[in-house]
Amino acid sequence: MTSGTGVENTERGVSEVDTAHELDLYRQMLLIRRFEERVYLLYLQGEIPGTLHQSQGQEAVAVGVCDVLQRTDWITSTHRPHGHALAKGVDLRAAMAELFGKATGCCGGKGGSMHLGDPSVGMLPAIAIVGGGNTVVTGLGLAFKLMRTDQVAVCFFGDGASNEGAFHEGLNFAAVQHLPIVFACENNLYGASTPFHETSLVPDVATRAAAYGVRGEIVDGMDVLAAREAAGRAVAEARAGDGPSLLEFKTYRFAGHSRGDVRGYRSRDEEADWKERDPIVRLRERLALTLDEGILDETDTQVEAALDEAVEFARQSPLPRPEDALTGAYATVIGREATP
């Protein structure tokens, strides 16, 4: 992809990005990285309850994919949803408050880290079940098809989920029904602590697309521009009625699987090699060729200030009321009776 043209590639349906757009992509990735670093410290200090699954290193996938989506498009996410949520437009303060379990959170403090989401920006609250979104997303895609809208649904999932039955069922149903869905696999090489190559004789998830008659593509998930370009093609195809596709983003999580993972199952040399491809560093170096370093530093400062404000907002926000537990539910059981 050549940046700086600001023109639309109508053949692929992918718009090229200029320097200002690249700077915004950098800001979004940095915000996700700093958000996760901040909430991890807050978790260790006891301010954030529950658990955390971080995605440092994978920011280019969330940002690159969501950048080509419209607000009316929808995504499903995983137990590692922070990046997807912020990239899709979930309010920073509401996301932070949700992790704090506060009433001002995007899910009213009921979801926490693994269930971030906001329907108003097109994000179904994240599903922590591995592969859970791979069949739920077909409901979104089918609804769009039946309503004859031009909306697209994107399903984010990991390499571990590609060995779940839901992955195969969801992809097959979407293919047969010709649904406007993009299946976005974030292959960070490990399902928890198990290497993907030990659980599958197929080295690339994308090759499984052929079994269902859809297009598969392997993408550099450490390059936000490459991720954006591939997602742009897939989204344009889905929006045009060409059916689903499967994108496999080769990426890497710098942190462990969850908050207590010391990463003993992988070598430090491997980690160092992947950190050489840090998507944020790569884009900053690219921007430094055309932008003054002070502009990049100011962007960093703005991100930190926004996070400071979000943390303070979360701290000052009220806890949910006990009776709030009965709201937003399909049915509330009172004695032996169910009230819708």
Image (spheres, helix red, strand yellow):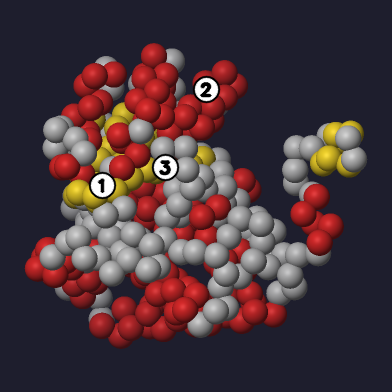
Question: Badge 1 local density, few (<14 within 10 Å), some, or many (20+)?
Answer: many
Question: Badge 2 local density, few (<14 within 10 Å), some, or many (20+)?
Answer: some
- Looking at the rendered structure, which numbered label has been put on residue 78? none
**Residue pictured at 19% horizontal, 35% vertical:** 200
Quarter of the view holding residue 175: top left
**Residue at the disc numbered 2:** 142
Pick the quarter of the image with the C terminus. top right
Give the CA separation, mark 2 to mark 1.
26 Å
| Residue at the extreme front | 336
Q: Secondary structure at mark 1?
A: strand
| Residue at the extreme top | 176
Q: Nearer the viewer, mark 2 or mark 1?
A: 1
Q: Nearer the viewer, mark 3 or mark 1?
A: 3
Q: Amino acid at mark 2?
A: Leu
- Residue 222 drawn at (x, y percent): 22, 57
286 relative to 60, above or below? below
**Residue at the disc numbered 1:** 187
- Residue 111 drawn at (x, y percent): 61, 55
Q: Amino acid at mark 1?
A: Asn
